[in-house]
Image (tube, rainbow, N blue to C red):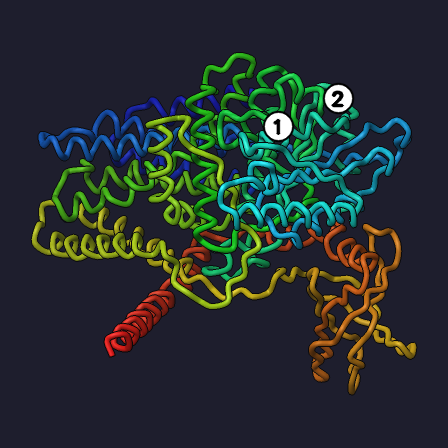
């Protein structure tokens, strides 16, 4: 009965003809209905899923009604250039509408799986596990932490083996013609071999660097024998309970080929660090994908492999001859191939692997370009829309993830089309103000309402638009290469672990300076058009506001382009452990940790003391070590007024280093707590005010830093002329 009612409402909203006044009344009534249903769906009662479904159907009906109106009544023009612009804009809107529709379908009911653990499982019956850590150019320090953490996993020692797969020390690298590079590769290989001996891991390398990460892993599969395979990127540090929460899903269903977990980033990406400075207060970009989208895909048995932080079944991998390598996103491609064979995937929404986000904007863009190219390769090579073996909802799941990465085409059109009208006078949008109020505005509001309903806790308003504008020009160029030659892209390793000694302007800034100049010119032209062309004033107001919105977003991007100083090797993350600081003579001070990293911590003491000794031991319970740990520390700072103590850990032995890693990185409950405090919904107006608040200061920073750079260059030229 409910579904029949929904279909009737949807049919009425789509098919009944109305004039503009009737459409306005109907549209805004439906918007109020969506708002009411969204509120009810957030309450925990037995009908909340029905309210959620009804809100999605009503919102999508407004979008479909808008696209029908656009296609039937607003595409008439006699000017060929205007017709081209008009159709480009309409195609971009169709793309946005399709991706929005598929996204709503995929995320209609994100799956919340209950915890499964190995607590009641006989250790003798557990499958053997090989942990594979591929590496190419990551630093030894980063690799060591990952290997030590992997060795600390709670699992029978005789069934757990850790392998480092070194692609930076292959025979090809060690014997290359460049003697210095060959020597560096040889030294790297020797150092990593010694590291593996020290931590109890196995070292593997190969002769040639073929097929990048996929080839590296597939080579290792011939030299390992574990029934289950865990793949961890070199910078991805697992918690001790990783296998405890993932292996049970493999045991319960022999058709499961994959158990994927979130990639929890322990440091901010360039947008979070440079622009918002709110890494601990707002959901990250990853949270939307791993906190909502992967759960939505999991409901349809379409969650896919993300390259790391996952368990795979060797027997199923062998059927497809290891990781697939036709695309540069071998992870999603492998999942696609195994889903097509009828095997199943599981997504466990528990952060148990902490990794490093790219520190610089260059590295960030490079990573996203590879993702976009790889997913587009899957679209062109695998054709998921009609792939045999996939269910229709799995096809939609893959299409949702793939089509998202085509956003640069639509985003660039949305940036430039207002200029086509304001500057060049092209008729890109044929509509009266009443029609815009009746069709366009309700569609935009409904789209926002549904996005908030689906992603409100894992994405702040305007953040996605900011990320898209930041990437669109560079990713557009990368995508055109794929469409010209689908096999052209090559795998590029994302640089990680960089430290930034000084503030500087990103070398990518010149593109955005040009875009801002064009948009400003469009605004000036629009104001002139508004004053002097009264017949088109209504449409000019709408397009001018659209252009100003683009301008605000472009100015916001300037904040990201100021690369901020970041000297600390590890980001400090919030914590709340009760600890005791103890001196060598037995004196003790009780307090609570406020934040910590592998390097040290900050503690607030419960009582104020005149002074503290320089060297103390931190004593606290470590869930991952399942014991109290005693960590030697050196005092760096003590404020007698607040009781705040800052200190660094002293790594005086391998045993102490293992304890530091276990205590700071090994407890998944800490990552859960950190994520929960970030996932809070905010209103659109709060998000918009926040963007405005932090957007205009970077204009001054860019101006000052560019003037200083020009002054320095001028002085250097004068000095050389002397």
Quadrant containing the N terminus in the rendered view: top right
Q: Which residue is mark 2?
A: 253
Q: In the drawing, does residue 134 fall left or right of residue 526?
A: right
User: Depth check: 270 or 330 in front?
Assistant: 330
Q: Is residue 446 above or below residue 321?
A: below
| Image location of residue 105, percent across then percent down | 50, 28
Which residue is depicted at the point 39% across and 34% down?
A: 406
User: Depth check: 462 or 9 in front?
Assistant: 462
Secondary structure of residue under mark 1? helix
Q: How busy is the neighbourhood of tag 2: few (under 14 within 10 Å), some, or many (20 plus)? A: few
Q: CA distance from mark 1 to mark 2?
A: 16 Å
Secondary structure of residue under mark 2? loop
Which residue is depicted at the point 28% across and 77% down?
A: 719
Residue 286, label in figure: none
User: Depth check: 722 or 530 in front?
Assistant: 722
Q: Which residue is mark 1?
A: 299
Q: Nearer the viewer, mark 1 or mark 2?
A: 2
Which callout, 1 or 2, points at the residue further toward the start of the chain? 2
Whether residue 693 can be seen here: no
Q: Quadrant of residue 449?
A: top left
């Amino acid at each position: 009965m409910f579904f029949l009612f929904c279909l009737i409402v949807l049919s009425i909203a789509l098919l009944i003809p109305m004039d503009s006044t009737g459409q306005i009344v109907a549209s805004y009534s439906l918007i109020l209905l969506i708002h009411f249903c969204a509120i009810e769906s957030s309450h925990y009662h037995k009908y909340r899923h029905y309210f959620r479904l009804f809100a999605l159907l009503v919102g999508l009906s407004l979008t479909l009604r808008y696209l029908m109106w656009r296609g039937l009544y607003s595409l008439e023009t006699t000017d060929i250039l205007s017709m081209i612009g008009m159709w480009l804009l309409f195609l971009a809107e169709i793309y946005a509408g399709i991706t929005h529709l598929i996204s709503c379908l995929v995320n209609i009911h994100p799956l919340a799986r209950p915890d499964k653990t190995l607590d009641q499982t006989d250790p003798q019956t557990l499958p053997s596990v090989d942990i594979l850590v591929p590496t190419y150019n990551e630093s030894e320090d980063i690799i060591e932490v990952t290997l030590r953490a992997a060795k600390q996993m709670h699992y029978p020692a005789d069934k757990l083996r850790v392998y480092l797969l070194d692609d930076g020390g292959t025979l090809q690298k060690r014997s290359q013609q460049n003697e210095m590079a060959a020597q560096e590769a040889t030294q790297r290989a020797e150092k990593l071999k010694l590291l593996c001996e020290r931590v109890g891991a196995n070292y593997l390398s190969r002769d040639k660097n073929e097929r990048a990460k996929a080839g590296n892993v597939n080579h290792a599969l011939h030299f390992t024998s574990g029934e289950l395979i865990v793949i961890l990127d070199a910078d991805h540090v697992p918690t001790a309970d990783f296998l405890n929460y993932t292996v049970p899903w493999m045991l319960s269903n022999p058709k499961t080929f994959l158990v994927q977990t979130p990639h929890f980033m322990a440091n901010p990406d360039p947008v979070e660090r440079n622009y918002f400075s709110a890494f601990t207060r707002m959901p990250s970009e990853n949270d939307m994908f791993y906190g909502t989208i992967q759960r939505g895909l999991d409901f349809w048995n379409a969650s896919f492999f993300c390259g790391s932080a996952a368990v795979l079944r060797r027997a199923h991998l062998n059927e497809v001859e290891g990781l697939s390598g036709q695309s540069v996103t071998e992870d999603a491609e492998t999942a696609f191939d195994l889903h097509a064979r009828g095997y199943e995937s599981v997504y466990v929404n528990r952060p148990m692997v902490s990794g490093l986000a790219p520190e610089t904007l260059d590295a960030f863009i490079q990573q996203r370009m590879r993702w976009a190219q790889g997913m587009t390769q899957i679209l062109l090579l695998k054709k998921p829309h009609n792939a045999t073996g996939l269910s229709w909802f799995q096809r939609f799941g893959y299409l949702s993830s793939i089509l998202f990465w085509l956003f640069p085409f639509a985003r660039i059109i949305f940036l430039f089309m207002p200029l086509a009208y304001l500057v060049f006078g092209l008729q890109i949008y044929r509509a009266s103000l009443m029609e815009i109020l009746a069709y366009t505005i309700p569609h935009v509001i409904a789209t926002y309402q549904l996005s908030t309903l689906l992603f409100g806790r894992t994405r702040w308003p305007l953040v996605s638009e900011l990320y898209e504008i930041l990437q669109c020009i560079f990713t557009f160029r990368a995508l055109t290469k794929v469409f010209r030659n689908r096999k052209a892209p090559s795998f590029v390793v994302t640089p990680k672990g960089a430290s930034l000694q000084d503030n500087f302007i990103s070398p990518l800034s010149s593109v955005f300076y040009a875009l801002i100049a064009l948009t400003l010119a469009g605004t000036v032209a629009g104001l002139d058009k508004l004053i002097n062309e009264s017949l088109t004033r209504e449409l000019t107001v709408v397009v001018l506001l659209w252009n100003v919105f683009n301008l605000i977003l472009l100015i916001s991007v300037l904040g990201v382009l100021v690369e901020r100083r970041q000297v600390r090797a590890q980001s400090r993350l919030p914590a709340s452990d009760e600890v005791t600081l103890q001196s060598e003579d037995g004196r003790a001070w009780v307090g609570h940790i406020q934040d910590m990293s592998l390097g040290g911590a900050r503690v607030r003491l419960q009582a104020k003391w005149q002074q503290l000794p320089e060297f103390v031991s931190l004593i606290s319970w470590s869930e991952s070590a399942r014991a109290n740990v005693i960590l030697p520390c050196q005092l760096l700072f003590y404020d007698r007024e607040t009781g705040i103590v800052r200190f660094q850990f002293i790594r005086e032995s391998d045993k102490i280093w293992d304890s530091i890693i276990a205590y700071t990185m090994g407890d998944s409950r800490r990552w859960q707590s950190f994520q929960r405090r970030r996932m809070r919904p905010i209103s659109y107006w709060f998000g918009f005010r926040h963007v405005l608040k932090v957007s205009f200061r970077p204009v001054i920073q860019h101006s000052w830093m560019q003037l200083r750079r020009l002054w320095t260059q001028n002085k250097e030229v004068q000095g050389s002329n002397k």
